[in-house]
Image (tube, coloured by chain):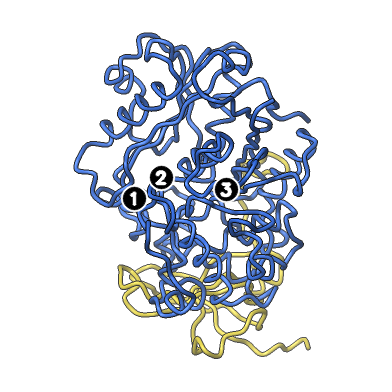
């Protein structure tokens, strides 16, 4: 239910897929579905929404908070999930 | 808006030993702790007519009655959200006795959390639907879930894992002189902390994490006017409240405006200061729920014991040790004494006010027992 208006209607809207890295961890615990180390990230989308995802294409030692990221979609353990990777800021 | 203020008191405390393998059922642990608490108060099981525990506790109210010999119960309630609700149990009990819904309420929490289902392990079995937003990305343990919150705090204020370690050293120092603690006579150094393995890099090492423990604890709440006729010194519930905020989660927060602060604890603190008339300087001992060491940092700041971002220095300067300005987790806390889901910290608060704590703070009059999103202030004497 929408907490603003109480509506039960659903809608879809396309987001930019761009945002920044709010916080992150290295996830190493050797358990399913997390066999290999990966970076778990809290992404702040440009639209103001935060969501948990993963950060790809970057070494943990190079990660910094608030870097620009962009979405890619990938299969993770058989599930299609949004993932993020570093992105150059085009809008300066 | 008023919170629960005065009118109720903790009159009995009881517990089992804290171990890694109790060798008996959770119900037996529960019954032993409840019986001990009732006896400590100088009451009989037949005097108890209410009980409060966690939604997560496996011990059924009727099974407890049958085991302990409680004849008639007219109040039962449970608090949600795991350890964040630890202090809410006392609020429930106080509300029950002040309203007249019950005369004497026993609060209990008992589990085999090390030899049975371990909270620190990857989550298994049915999970709440909200975990669908976390689990597929690898957030499968509390350490990881909380670390994703802590990392923003570290970034915002330039805090390192070594800074967190200074809390762990204090917790283990307090536990080392508390015979009730699992880590009795086992202090650690900061080097020990820094040499312990990463649990979640670069946030938490092993020695930042609370224990997994087997054990049971219980306490008895009744009206203050009745408490005066009982066996123990009166420990008044001066204030009790909860802080549940929109878009929150159990204790961590990914969606609030400022994730380097603990909005739920700030709300709880404001309620308590406003309604008790007390201020941070009035608190003699703070018992602060810490499933992981950083949660102490957030709460020290939320209650105004120090400013935002200042917990690192506040701890490094020795303020939270016995003899410091604000002794914290004098029993060793959940890292040092044991993890009975935070309720063992409330028992320590009672001991401080009775003057019977292993690491006694001289003339303690006001003790804060904060579990993040629920908290009580306990007061001694009259």
Q: Nearer the viewer, residue B337 or B363?
A: B363
As drawn, the label of residue B295 is: none
Residue furthest left in the image: B23
Chain identity of mark 2: B
Using the rendered image of the protein, determine whether residue B249 is visible from the camera's viewpoint: yes
Dot 1 falls on a residue whose secondary structure is loop
Dot 2 falls on a residue whose secondary structure is loop
Q: Residue at x 65, y 58 (%)?
A: B324
- Separation of disc 1 and disc 2 at Cα? 7 Å
Q: Colour of chain A?
A: yellow
Q: Residue at x 48, y 24 (%)?
A: B220
Q: Nearer the viewer, residue B150 or B335?
A: B335
Kindly report which numbered mark, 3 or 2, lies closer to the viewer in this rendering: 3
Respond whether the residues carrying marks 1 and 2 are from the same subunit.
yes
State which quadrant residue B318 falls in: bottom right
Using the rendered image of the protein, determine whether residue A44 is visible from the camera's viewpoint: no
Kindly report which numbered mark, 3 or 1, lies closer to the viewer in this rendering: 3
Mark closest to the chain's N terminus, 3 or 1: 1
- Decide: is B214 above or below B217: below
In percent of width and height, residue B15 lies at: 37, 35
As drawn, the label of residue B340 is: 2
Mark closest to the chain's N terminus, 3 or 2: 3
Q: Are marks 1 and 2 in contact (CB under 8 Å)?
A: yes
Chain identity of mark 1: B
Mark closest to the chain's N terminus, 1 or 2: 1
As drawn, the label of residue B213 is: 1
**Which residue has dot 3 on it?**
B287
Answer few, some or many: residues within 10 Å of disc 1's Cα (few below 14, many 20 plus, some between 14 and 19).
many
Chain coloured blue in the rendered structure = B
State which quadrant residue B363 falls in: top right
Dot 3 falls on a residue whose secondary structure is strand
- Separation of disc 3 and disc 2 at Cα? 14 Å
């Amino acid at each position: 239910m929408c907490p603003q208006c109480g509506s039960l209607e659903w809608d879809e809207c396309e987001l930019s897929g761009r945002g920044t890295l709010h916080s992150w961890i290295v996830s190493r615990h050797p358990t399913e579905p997390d066999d290999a180390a990966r970076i778990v990230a809290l992404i702040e989308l440009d639209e103001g929404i935060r969501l948990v995802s993963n950060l790809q294409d970057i070494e943990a030692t190079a990660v910094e908070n608030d870097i620009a990221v962009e979405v890619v979609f990938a299969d993770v353990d058989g599930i299609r999930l949004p993932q993020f990777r570093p992105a150059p800021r085009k809008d300066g | 808006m008023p919170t629960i203020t005065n009118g109720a008191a903790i009159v009995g405390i009881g517990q089992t030993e804290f171990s890694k393998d109790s060798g008996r059922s959770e119900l037996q642990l529960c019954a032993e702790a409840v019986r001990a608490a009732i006896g400590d108060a100088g009451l009989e099981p037949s005097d108890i007519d209410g009980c409060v525990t966690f939604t997560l506790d496996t011990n059924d109210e009727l099974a407890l009655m049958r085991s302990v010999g409680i004849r008639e119960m007219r109040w039962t309630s449970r608090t949600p959200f795991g350890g964040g609700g630890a202090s809410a149990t006392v609020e429930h009990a106080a509300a029950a006795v002040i309203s007249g819904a019950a005369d004497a309420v026993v609060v209990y929490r008992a589990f085999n959390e090390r030899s049975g289902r371990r909270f620190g392990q990857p989550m298994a079995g049915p999970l709440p639907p909200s975990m669908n937003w976390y689990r597929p990305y690898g957030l499968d343990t509390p350490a990881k879930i909380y670390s994703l919150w802590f990392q923003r705090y570290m970034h915002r204020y330039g805090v390192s894992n070594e800074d967190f370690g200074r809390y762990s050293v204090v917790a283990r120092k307090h536990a080392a002189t508390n015979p009730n603690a699992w880590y009795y006579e086992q202090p650690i150094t900061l080097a020990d902390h820094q040499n312990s393995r990463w649990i979640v890099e670069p946030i938490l090492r092993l020695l930042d994490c609370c224990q997994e423990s087997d054990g049971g604890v219980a306490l008895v709440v009744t009206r203050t006017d009745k408490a005066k006729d009982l066996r123990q010194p009166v420990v008044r519930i001066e204030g009790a409240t909860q802080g549940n905020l929109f878009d929150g989660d159990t204790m961590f927060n990914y969606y609030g405006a400022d994730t380097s602060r603990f909005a739920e604890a700030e709300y709880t603190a404001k309620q308590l200061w406003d309604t008790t008339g007390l201020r941070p300087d009035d608190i003699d001992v703070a018992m602060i729920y810490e499933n992981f060491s950083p949660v102490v940092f957030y709460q020290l700041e939320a209650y105004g014991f120090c400013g935002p971002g200042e917990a690192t220095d506040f701890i490094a300067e020795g303020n939270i040790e016995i003899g410091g300005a604000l002794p914290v987790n004098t029993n060793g806390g959940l890292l040092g004494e044991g993890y009975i889901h935070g309720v063992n910290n409330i028992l320590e608060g009672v001991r401080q006010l009775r003057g019977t704590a292993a690491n006694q703070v001289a003339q303690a009059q006001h003790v804060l027992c904060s579990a993040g999103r629920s908290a009580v202030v306990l007061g001694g004497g009259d």
